[in-house]
Amino acid sequence: MSITVQTKLNFVPWQYIADWKCDMCGSCCKLYSVVIDFPEWLQIVKNFGVEKTVAGLDRFYIKRSSDGSCPFICGFAGACMCGLQNKKPGACKQWPFKVLLEPKFGDANHALYRYSDLNLFVYADSMCSGLRYGNPRWEFGAVTLREFVEITLGKRQTQHNTTRSLKLF
């Protein structure tokens, strides 16, 4: 018996997704390196010190903890939350969706998303356990996905439907 490990990321066109809700599993904070732009890097350095970041050849990243996770992940009551919640990097605000100008991951017809006069191509990272597959619910396409698109395009900064907070009371 052989085991095949798939190393290529699998992206799913948005029209195969019925809904998405963050289930606070923390996988995104444990599996991926977070790319940050210069203003995000400056904000993190100013508030937490340069040791929380690392520079690549042409990018900055949040430096991963010794266990491989993001140093800002916070566990509480069995859930994972972002310690940067209101100052999350753009890459974290957009995950698990990729909003592109070209159909980079195939199946352009099912990835097509019309926003105003733009034809965009939206895919979801299948590693996210918050995805629910099926025919897209109206609210998912018109509200949640629209918010992801607007965050990606820089038309919105705050998150409402594209994040989750732990309600204590």
Image (tube, rainbow, N blue to C red):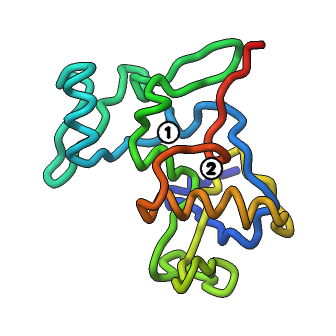
85 and 92: which is toward the camera: 85
The amino acid at mark 2 is Met
Instruction: Tell me the residue at 43%/23% (across/down).
Output: 72
**Tag of residue 127:** 2
Residue count near mark 1 (Cα–Cα under 10 Å), binned few <14, some 14–19, many ≥20: few
Q: Is residue 70 left or right of residue 166?
A: left
- Do the CB atoms of the residues marked 2 and 1 lie less than 8 Å apart? yes
Locate residue 115, reporting x and y percent: 58, 77
- Residue at image point 41% right, 34% down: 87
Image quarter (top left, top right, bottom left or bottom right) of the C terminus? top right
Query: Within the image, what quadrant is residue 113 found in?
Result: bottom right
Q: Under tag 2, what secondary structure?
A: loop
| Disc 1, SS | helix
What residue lies at 27% left-to-right and 29% top-to-bottom? 44
The residues tagged by marks 2 and 1 sit, at their Cα atoms, a distance apart of 9 Å
Nearer to us in this view, 30 or 143:
143
Q: Nearer the viewer, residue 158 or 141?
A: 158
Vertical position of residue 38 compared to residue 12: above or below:
above
Q: Look at label 1 and name its amino acid.
A: Leu
- From the top left corner, tell me how far across and down residue 66 is, in percent: 36, 20
- Most extreme residue toward the left, as rendered? 57
Location of residue 58 in the rendering, given as x and y in whole percent from the top left corner: 16, 54
Residue on which the image places disc 1 = 31
Measuring 45% from the left and 42% from the top, which residue is drawn there? 32
Q: Does 64 appear above or below 8?
A: above
Where residue 154 sits, quadrant-wise, is bottom left
Ranked by sequence position, the earlier of labels 2 and 1 is 1
